Image (cartoon, helix red, strand yellow):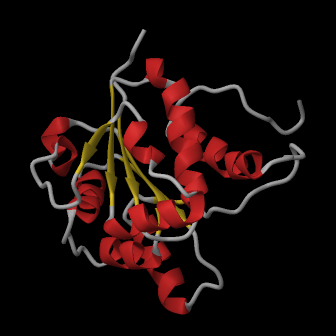
Amino acid sequence: MKNNNKIAIAVTGASGSIYAKVLLDKLLLLKEQTLEISLVMSDNAKDIWQFELANDAYKNYPFKIYSKTDFSAPFASGSAKYNTLIICPCSMGTLARIATGISNDLITRAADVILKERRKLILVTRDTPLSLIHINNMRTVTEAGGIICPATPSFYSKPQTIEEVAATVIDRVIDLAGLEQDSYRWGK
């Protein structure tokens, strides 16, 4: 039975397309827990996906895909009642635009809407080292109600493949989004 979860996924041009792929794969498996899943990708995200994963499989998911310039997408407005926006991976440029309120594309507009509506914004940041500008932008987004979830894998579960390593991050993201899943739990 589906609940009322509406989730928008945004993929930006940071390295780490594997995180986006694992997230989309897991959401596909958990689709009975969602009412709607939407996807938007920056142009750089598409290029990096192609470079890192050597395919354009993001086109094959059964989620509605929106153009980064489509401000008529439902999650561009609070009235559509999307519960969660996950930006995975989230570039430092996207983080900066969100932190300063610059809504120049669908991704940053959706983040602005999620924050103003006091809903769940999860940014899977993927960069290192961090400058003071990055840290201050993370602070600003956190103080505004967003969740910074760096793409920092854990190794408690003894992952054996790159997908399993990426899943250690994505399992946390899925938990933060409030979806139920069977994943490694400390102490079990």
Q: Residue extending furthest top?
A: 1
Res. 185 image quadrant? top right
Residue at 89 percent across and 30 percent down: it is 188
Q: Quadrant of residue 46?
A: bottom left
Q: Position of residue 165 (x, y in %)?
A: 76, 51
The location of residue 27, given as percent across then percent down, is: 50, 33
Residue that protrudes farthest toward the left in the picture? 72
- Residue occupying image coordinates x 40% and y 25%: 34
- Residue 133's place in the image compared with 38, above or below, is below
Q: Determine whether 131 is above or below 143 in the image.
A: below
Q: Residue at x 27, y 65 (%)?
A: 108
Residue sitting at the far bottom: 132
Q: Residue 117: x and y, percent?
A: 24, 49
Name the residue at 50% across, 83% down. 134
As drawn, is 141 to the left or to the right of 52?
left
Q: How many numbered markers are drawn?
A: 0
Image quadrant in which the N terminus is located:
top left
Q: Is residue 94 visible?
A: yes
Residue located farthest toward the front when viewing the structure as drawn: 54
Out of 178 and 34, give the one closest to the viewer. Answer: 34
In this view, the residue in front, 58 or 148, is 58
In x, y percent, where is residue 78?
A: 17, 45
Evaluate whether residue 176 shows in this view.
no
